[in-house]
C-alpha cells in the first residue's frame, strides 16, 4: 500500500458524515458539560474564607463580592442622592428588626465615644449633638432581607458632625467603624458613604426621640446602605484605613452592601 | 446484484455508482454487502439547522439560569412577597431556609455570566441576521393560534413554518424580552439608589421585586413547556441543538 493513500481525503457517505458529526458534537457537548459540572463542584465545595474582617462565605464568592464592589465604585457616583418623600409619608408603625447589641440594659450617662487617631477620646453627650444643626430625612429604608419601608428620621448630618468636631483629617481615612456600647454589634462604613449628605447620626424618629428598640439614644441612618449598616445605639466611633470589623460581613454578607 | 439495483433504483434515485461498478478489484463481496446496506436504507440528507454559536449560547444559558433561579430562591425566602406560592415543605425539600447571604453571593457572581451570555446572544442574532427567523412577523400571532390548535390535536393541518413556527418565534422572542426585564428589574433591586430612575421605571422598589420574581416564574413555566415540546418533537430535533443538523429522509 502506498503511503499517499493514508493521506488521501476520503469521500464520506452521508451516513458516515452523520455518524462522524454526531460523535464530534456529542463528545464536545460532554466535554462542555463535564467542565461545567466540575467547575460547579469546585465552586460549591470550595473552602470557606478564613474568618477575619469578613467570613462565612466560600473564598471565591468573597473574592467576587469584593471585585464587584470595586468594579461598581469605578462607575458609581458616591454622592448620588437617595429619593426622599414628604415627612407625612413616613410609616407610623416603623418596622423593627434585630436587637443584637441593644438587648442589654442601656447604662445611664450614655455618651458617644469618639476615639481619635492620636488616642485622644471625645465624649459627646446627646445634648451636645442636639445643639448641632438638625437634618430630617424621609426615605425608603431597605432591609437586606428584601422588605422596605418609607420612614422619617432626624438627627445630625454625619458630615456636619465631622466639621463641628474638627475631624476632617479623620474623614480623609477610608473607613469609619461604629459599635454598640456592649460591642455585640458593629459595622464598618466606607468613608464616601459615611460622608454622604444624607447620612445621619440620628436621634429622632417621626419627630419623637428614638424609642429604645429603634436605637435610643443615637443611631446611624445611612440611606445608601441596607438596614444592617444602620447601627442602633452607637457607643464608639473609630476611624481607620483598614476595614473595621462588621457583624454581618463576618456572617457571609457583602462587606459594603451599597445600594 | 443487478436485480437488487434495478429493484431499488426507483426509490433511491441517487446511489453510489462507484460502488455499484466495483472500481476496486479486491474484496468484491465486501463491496456487495456494503452496497446492499446502502440500498436497504433510505436516502438521507443532512440539513443544517442551528449554528454553533446558537448551540453554545443555549447550553451555556441553561446552567446559568438554573443557578440564578436557585440562588434567587435562597434570597426570596428571607422576605417572600407571595408567601402562598412556596409551602414550607418546598423550602425544606430544597434546603432553602437561612441561606440568604449564600444566595446573594452566588446571585451576584453568576449575574455577570448570565448577562454577558444573554447580551452576546442578542448581538449574535442581530449581526448574523438570525433574528429574522426569530422575531415574530405580522402573520405570527394568527399562525401561533393555529400552532396551538395543532399541538392540542384540535386541528390536523400543520401551519406553515420556516426554521421556527409562529409559536416558537413568539416564545423565543418573549424569553429575550423577559431576560431584558430581569436585567432591568434586577439592577433596580440591586442598586436602587444608583439606579433610582430604573426603580421608578419599574414602578418602585416593591414592584421591581414582584416583577423580577414573576419573570422567574415565567422562566420556569417556559422551561416546562419547552421540555414537553422537545420530548414531543423527538430525537432528530433534540440532536440538532447539540450537533447542529437534522437528518431528513427522502423517499
Image (cartoon, coloured by chain):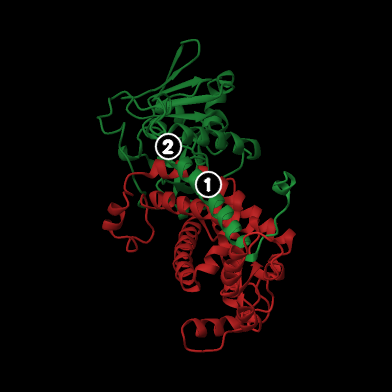
The number of numbered badges drawn on the structure is: 2
Badge 1 or badge 2: first in the primary sequence: 1
Q: Is residue B244 above or below residue A98?
A: below
Snapshot quadrant of residue A72? top right
Q: Residues within 10 Å of mark 2 (few under 14, many from 20)?
A: many
Where disc 1 sits, the SS reads: helix
Q: Chain of mark 1?
A: A
Q: Are marks 1 and 2 in contact (CB under 8 Å)?
A: no
* Chain of residue at mark 2: A
Task: Kindly tell me whether residue A255 is visible in this rendering.
Answer: no
Give the color of chain A as drawn. Answer: green
User: Residue placed at 52% from the left, 39% from the top?
Assistant: A258
In the rendered image, the vertical position of residue A155 relative to residue A119, given as above or below: below
Say if residue A84 shows up in the picture: yes
Between A133 and B162, which is closer to the camera in this rendering? B162
Q: Nearer the viewer, mark 1 or mark 2?
A: 1
Q: Which residue is mark 1?
A: A31
The chain letter of the red chain reads B
Q: Position of residue B173 (x, y in %)?
A: 61, 67
Q: Disc 1 to disc 2, how far (Cα)?
A: 34 Å
Label disc, if present, on residue B111 of the rendered structure: none
Helix, strand or loop for disc 2: loop
Residue beneath label 2, please?
A253
**At x 40% / y 29%, what residue is drawn?**
A55
Task: Please say if A243 is above or below A98.
Answer: above
Amino acid at each position: 500500500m502506498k503511503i499517499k493513500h493514508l493521506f488521501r481525503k476520503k469521500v464520506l457517505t452521508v451516513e458516515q458524515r452523520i455518524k462522524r458529526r454526531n460523535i464530534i458534537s456529542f463528545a464536545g457537548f460532554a466535554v462542555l458539560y463535564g467542565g461545567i459540572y466540575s467547575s460547579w463542584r469546585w465552586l460549591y465545595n470550595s473552602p470557606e474564607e478564613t474568618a477575619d474582617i469578613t467570613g462565612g462565605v466560600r473564598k471565591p464568592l468573597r473574592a467576587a463580592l469584593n471585585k464587584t464592589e470595586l468594579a461598581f465604585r469605578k462607575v458609581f457616583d458616591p454622592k448620588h442622592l437617595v429619593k426622599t418623600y414628604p415627612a407625612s409619608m413616613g410609616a407610623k408603625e416603623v418596622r423593627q428588626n434585630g436587637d443584637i447589641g441593644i438587648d442589654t440594659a442601656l447604662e445611664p450617662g450614655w455618651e458617644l465615644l469618639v476615639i481619635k487617631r492620636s488616642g485622644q477620646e471625645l465624649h459627646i453627650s446627646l445634648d451636645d449633638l442636639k445643639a448641632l444643626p438638625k437634618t430630617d430625612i424621609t426615605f425608603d429604608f431597605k432591609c437586606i432581607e428584601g422588605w422596605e419601608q418609607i420612614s422619617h428620621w432626624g438627627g445630625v448630618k454625619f458630615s456636619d458632625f465631622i466639621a463641628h468636631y474638627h475631624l476632617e483629617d479623620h474623614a480623609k481615612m477610608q473607613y469609619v467603624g461604629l459599635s454598640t456600647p456592649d460591642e455585640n454589634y458593629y459595622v464598618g462604613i466606607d468613608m464616601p458613604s459615611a460622608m454622604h449628605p444624607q447620612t445621619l447620626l440620628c436621634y429622632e424618629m417621626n419627630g419623637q426621640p428614638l424609642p429604645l428598640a429603634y436605637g435610643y439614644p443615637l443611631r446611624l441612618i445611612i440611606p445608601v446602605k441596607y438596614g444592617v449598616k444602620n447601627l442602633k445605639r452607637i457607643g464608639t466611633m473609630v476611624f481607620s484605613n483598614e476595614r473595621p470589623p462588621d457583624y454581618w460581613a463576618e456572617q457571609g454578607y457583602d462587606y459594603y452592601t451599597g445600594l | 446484484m443487478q436485480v437488487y439495483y434495478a429493484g431499488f433504483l426507483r426509490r433511491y434515485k441517487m446511489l453510489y455508482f462507484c460502488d455499484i461498478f466495483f472500481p476496486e478489484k479486491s474484496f468484491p463481496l465486501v463491496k456487495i454487502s456494503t452496497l446492499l446496506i446502502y440500498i436497504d436504507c433510505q436516502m438521507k440528507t443532512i440539513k443544517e439547522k442551528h449554528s454553533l454559536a446558537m448551540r453554545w449560547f443555549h447550553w451555556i444559558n441553561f446552567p446559568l439560569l438554573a443557578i440564578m433561579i436557585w440562588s434567587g430562591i435562597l434570597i426570596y425566602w428571607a422576605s417572600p412577597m407571595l408567601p402562598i406560592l412556596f409551602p414550607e415543605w418546598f423550602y425544606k425539600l430544597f434546603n432553602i431556609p437561612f441561606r440568604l447571604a449564600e444566595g446573594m453571593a452566588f446571585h451576584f457572581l453568576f449575574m455577570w455570566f448570565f448577562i454577558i451570555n444573554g447580551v452576546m446572544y442578542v448581538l449574535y442574532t442581530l449581526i448574523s441576521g438570525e433574528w429574522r427567523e426569530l422575531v415574530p412577523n405580522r402573520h405570527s400571532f394568527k399562525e401561533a393560534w393555529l400552532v396551538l390548535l395543532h399541538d392540542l390535536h384540535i386541528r390536523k393541518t400543520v401551519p406553515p413554518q420556516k426554521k421556527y413556527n409562529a409559536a416558537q418565534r413568539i416564545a423565543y422572542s418573549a424569553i429575550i424580552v423577559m431576560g431584558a426585564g430581569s436585567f432591568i428589574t434586577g439592577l433596580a433591586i440591586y442598586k436602587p439608589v444608583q439606579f433610582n430612575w430604573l426603580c421608578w421605571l419599574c414602578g418602585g422598589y416593591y414592584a421591581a421585586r414582584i416583577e423580577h420574581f414573576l419573570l422567574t416564574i415565567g422562566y420556569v413555566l417556559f422551561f416546562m413547556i419547552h421540555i414537553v415540546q422537545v420530548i414531543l418533537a423527538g430525537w432528530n430535533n433534540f440532536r440538532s441543538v447539540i450537533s447542529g443538523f437534522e437528518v431528513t429522509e427522502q423517499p
